[in-house]
């Protein structure tokens, strides 16, 4: 299921649907990462439409973060025994705080190894 068009018999039969995040992030909604979504549902039969449900639990729009930016050597702490690295947080954090970074390196083989 990729939309919530109630005229779709599959949605009616399965009593469920999914809303593409891309639709929520686009106009007219333009919801940012980390925004909570709350919904209400009504049912319609030949007689008419029901009242709406109570508000459902909010779902939060989350995704993986963008990669960090401005990776650079930190000459102030690079010496014969240490390589200093600095970077800035990603442009988009995916809707939740960054909690870890993983550093990998390659000695020219094309294979990166986690430090």
Image (cartoon, rainbow, N blue to C red):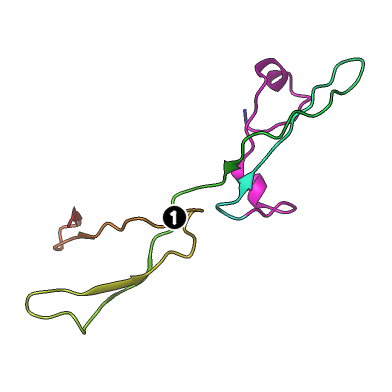
Image position of 114 with respect to 15: above or below: below
The answer to which of 18 and 53 lies nearer the viewer is 53
Outermost residue toward the right? 47
| Residue 71 at x, y percent in the picture | 32, 71
Outermost residue toward the left? 80
Residue 49 location, quadrant: top right
Residue 77 seen in render: yes
At 75% from the left and 29% from the top, the residue drawn is 41
Residue 37 location, quadrant: top right
Question: Predominant secondary structure in magenta?
Answer: loop
| Residue 20 at x, y percent in the picture | 62, 40
Viewport quadrant of the C terminus: bottom left
At 79% from the left and 26% from the top, the residue drawn is 42
Q: Which residues are magenta?
A: 2-31
Q: In screen coordinates, is 58 left or right of 49?
A: left
Q: How many numbered marks have been drawn onto this rendered protein structure?
A: 1
Report crowding for label 1: few under 14, some 14 to 19, many 20 or more residues within 10 A (C-alpha). some
Outermost residue toward the bottom? 76
Residue ID for mark 1? 65
The answer to which of 97 and 83 lies nearer the viewer is 97
Q: In screen coordinates, is 36 left or right of 91?
A: right
Image position of 69 with respect to 66: above or below: below
At 11% from the left and 81% from the top, the residue drawn is 79
The answer to which of 2 and 111 lies nearer the viewer is 2
Image position of 15 with respect to 93: above or below: above
**Element type where label 1 sits in the image:** loop
Q: In screen coordinates, is 89 left or right of 1?
A: left
| Residue 63 at x, y percent in the picture | 48, 48
Residue 26 inside the magenta-drawn segment = yes
At 51% from the left and 47% from the top, the residue drawn is 62
| Residue 68 at x, y percent in the picture | 38, 64
Residue 111 seen in render: no
């Amino acid at each position: 299921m990729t939309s919530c068009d109630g005229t779709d018999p599959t949605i009616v039969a399965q009593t469920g649907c999914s809303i593409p995040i891309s639709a929520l992030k686009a106009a007219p909604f333009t919801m940012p990462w980390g925004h909570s979504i709350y919904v209400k549902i009504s049912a319609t039969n030949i007689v008419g439409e029901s009242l709406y449900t109570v508000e459902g639990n909010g779902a939060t729009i989350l995704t993986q973060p963008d990669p960090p930016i401005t990776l650079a050597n930190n000459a102030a702490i690079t010496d014969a025994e240490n390589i200093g690295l600095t970077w800035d947080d990603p442009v988009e954090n995916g809707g939740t705080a960054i909690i870890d970074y993983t550093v990998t390196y390659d000695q020219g083989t094309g294979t990166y190894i986690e430090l």
